Amino acid sequence: MMERNLLSNLIKLSKLSILSILVILCIPIAFANYTIEDFEDVSDWTYGDDFGNFDTSTTQVKAGTYSGRMNATNTVAGTGNIQKEWNGLDASSYDNYSFWIWIDENDFPYEFLGQCSWRDQSADGCTNSDVSITKTLQTDDGWSQYISSGISTWTFCNVSDLDRLLCEISTEDAPSVPFYIYIDQLELVRPPDSCTPPTSGDWTIINGDACTLNEADTITGNLNISDGSLEIQGSGTLTVSGGYVYIYSGNQLSLLSGGQING
């Protein structure tokens, strides 16, 4: 059983009246999402088959200033592709990779639009990294979706050493060309931070999150700092209704001058 310490001991806290839940400030220092591409400059991407160009655009944007724009200029191959290579992209500490895509439904006769997939430095395809892009039945002309793939499900793949992302879009039987497809917000997504206390039960801080409390807050269970830290600032007061605070070895609870727990 993992050692549980609060200043080397388990402390039983006195019961006090429950305070209102106000604001908790979370600072997930080490666990922000990572933007793989902001599409401001796409000169390091390649394109081919039915795509005559891949450039930047401000026409359809999900985040930031730019998106990437695929220009389908013919339908001879039946698909167009874009790809980018890295010299070892480490995705091992992330949960998902995600991207946003926009199309005009009228340009696609079928439900299936295409897919994106990864390859590692050994030139092996990462099994289960394929993300299928499909459209849904809608009456408007525009379609967009934010799509995510779980990295932990990939096999035959060194996720700490990725070297290529390939996206292939169907152009088969398109009613007319040219037309555009937009891609944006390509990022690696970390696990959600644990700095927001639950509405009931224990509050468990994990994933190396560095949390800061600067107002009054109440949890109905116990406080467990399993992997991370909590700093209660001078304006912060935490009421732990469950009565116990557990700090696992190597983690930290800091009480700045004026900060309180059940006091």
Image (spheres, helix red, strand yellow):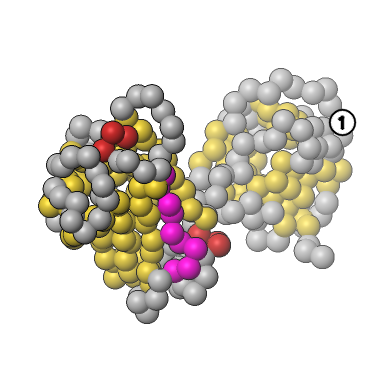
Q: How many marks?
A: 1
Residue placed most toward the observer, 197 or 91: 91
| The C terminus sits in image quarter | top right
Q: Residue at x 78, y 57 (%)?
A: 4
Look at the image and say whether residue 174 sits in the magenta stretch: no
Q: Which residues are magenta?
A: 126-134
The answer to whether residue 7 is visible is: no
SS of the residue at dot 1? loop
- Tell me which corner region of the image, top left, top right, bottom left or bottom right, holds residue 261: top right
Q: Label 1 is placed on what type of residue?
A: Lys
Find disc 1 in the rendering and name its residue.
15
Q: Is residue 79 left or right of residue 232?
A: left
Q: Residues within 10 Å of mark 1 (few under 14, many from 20)?
A: few
Residue placed most toward the observer, 116 or 3: 116
The answer to whether residue 78 is visible is: yes
**Residue 45: image x %, image y %?**
20, 58
| The N terminus sits in image quarter | bottom right
Q: Is residue 75 left or right of residue 184?
A: left
Q: Is residue 42 left or right of residue 241?
A: left
**Residue 79: image x %, image y %?**
26, 56
Q: Is residue 141 above or below residue 69?
A: above
